[in-house]
Amino acid sequence: MEKIGSAEPELEDLFESKKPVKNPLVPLGALVTAGVLTAGLISFRQGNSRLGQKLMRARVVAQGATVALMFGTAYYYGDKL
């Protein structure tokens, strides 16, 4: 039985055969990024632009580290599954 709106069967078989790899550090990095973003926005709203700028820079670092973790995990497990 074919699913409605599904892609080609060969393509679906390819994606079903790959196991998704879970890296617990990626959700943690996303939470840290969201937390620093929230703190920075609150800081700007309270008028402390110097602290807000530092937090926005920290957010960029946290976001970059999270993306690097995602790419690193994908690269490391790419051919091993």
Image: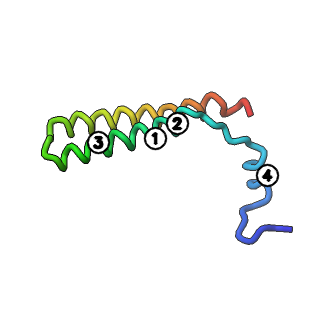
For label 2, the SS is helix
Residue at the farthest right position: 1
Disc marking residue 30: 1
Q: Residue at 29%, 42% (x, y): give it.
A: 39
Label 3 sits on residue: 39
Contact check, label 2 and label 1, Cβ < 8 Å: yes
Contact check, label 4 and label 1, Cβ < 8 Å: no
| 2 vs 4, front mark | 2
Identify residue type, mark 1. Answer: Ala
Q: Residues within 10 Å of mark 3 (few under 14, many from 20)?
A: some
Label 4 sits on residue: 13
**How far apart are the two marked residues, 1 and 3, measured between alpha carbons?**
14 Å
Identify residue type, mark 4. Answer: Asp
Q: Residue at 74%, 54% (x, y): give it.
A: 11
Looking at the image, residue 19 lies above or below residue 1? above
**How far apart are the two marked residues, 2 and 4, measured between alpha carbons?**
27 Å
Label 2 sits on residue: 26
| 1 vs 3, front mark | 3
Q: Residue at 58%, 34% (x, y): give it.
A: 24
Contact check, label 2 and label 4, Cβ < 8 Å: no
Identify residue type, mark 3. Answer: Ala
Contact check, label 2 and label 3, Cβ < 8 Å: no
Identify residue type, mark 2. Answer: Val
**How far apart are the two marked residues, 2 and 1, measured between alpha carbons?**
6 Å
